[in-house]
Image: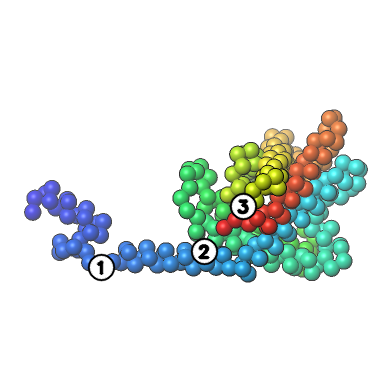
Amino acid sequence: MSTQGTLRWANRWYQGEVTPSGQPATASYPQRSNGSSHGVRQRVRRASHSRVVRSLARAGLIASGVVHVLIGVLGMSVANGIRVRADQSGALEAVADAPGGYILLWVATVALLGLGLWQWSGALTAGPDESKIFPRKLRDHAKALGFVGVGLACLAFAVGSRPDTAEGTKTLSSTLIGMPGGVFVLAAIGAVVGGVGIAFISRGVSRRFREDIDPPEGPWGQVVVAVGVIGHTLKGIALMTVGLLFVGGAVLTDADWTTGVDGAIRWLAALPTGPWPLFAISAGFMIHGLYLAARAVYLKR
């Protein structure tokens, strides 16, 4: 066999087209592997479309929507001079203090963790995606982790703990500022949070959120889409504000700047422009909560 023929045989053997003896490869191990993988995807797809799993996902979306609405209400309260924690911890504390609140928190925990698993399964069944920077699988994973994070926060309050997100974030920032090179890590965290905010704005303006929702035709469907656009955009601006404050805290080596959503809302409340920016951001959280409820009704996939 010539050198060229040897190279051709080696390449075909490497691709699994022939056996080491040069005979056509009749063993279909790669095909069995692909078939097995396809079978797993089919089982995951069937499970994600089951009534129980979809009901759990819908309940999780409603729970997440309620948390967003409560954050918006607390933000409005800050604008009116009421001293409350206007963030996720404040919202969950309000639920815990309500009659039957701990039962609701347990229900929300199960629903949100189920929603996270359902959203994660979307990455296993997603089809081709034209996006090269932030493909569908990565988007599904990011959303799933976000829902699981809210679910774990609900669990913490359900078992009687009262974690303070703002104080925890401030403590972490203080630790980073005191470490060599920690300010760069803090600034990087701010950049990531700001980047997520930009992604929310882009997702709202471009209406890419429609990959997750199947609104009806006609005027009501247009209202649902408008709610999605406004909610994503204003929440994105809020997250960008949080990210900028983190970067500011890193530059000024001041952890007081880095208290998360609660800090961003209080910073907006102190602006010389008056309460209008804060009202807009608070309304944005509430509108995004309505979008999540609408997504639960018009769930896609």
Determine the residue positioned at 20% across, 61% down: 18
* C-alpha gap between disc 2 and disc 1: 29 Å
Q: Amino acid at mark 2?
A: Arg
Taking 35 as reference, is 58 left or right? right
Q: Secondary structure at mark 2?
A: helix
Question: Who comes first in sequence, dot 2 or dot 3?
Answer: 2
Q: Nearer the viewer, residue 231 or 174?
A: 231
Residue 155 vs 145, above or below: the answer is below
Crowdedness near tag 2: few (<14), some (14–19) or many (≥20) residues, C-alpha within 10 Å: some
Q: Residue 216, image x and y in percent? A: 65, 51
The residue beneath circle 2 is 45
Q: Is residue 249 visible?
A: no
Q: Residue 191, image x and y in percent? A: 63, 39
Mark 3–mark 1 CB contact (< 8 Å): no
Determine the residue positioned at 59% across, 62% down: 118
- Residue farthest to the top, as pictured: 272
Taking 69 as reference, is 182 left or right? left
The residue beneath circle 1 is 27
Q: Nearer the viewer, residue 208 or 192?
A: 208
Q: Nearer the viewer, residue 57 or 237?
A: 57
Which of the two discs, 2 and 1, sits closer to the camera? 2
- Please give the label number shown on residue 214: 3
Taking 118 as reference, is 233 left or right? right
Q: Which picture quadrant has residue 65?
A: bottom right
* C-alpha gap between disc 2 and disc 3: 18 Å
Q: Residue 72, image x and y in percent? A: 80, 47
**Quarter containing the N terminus:** bottom left
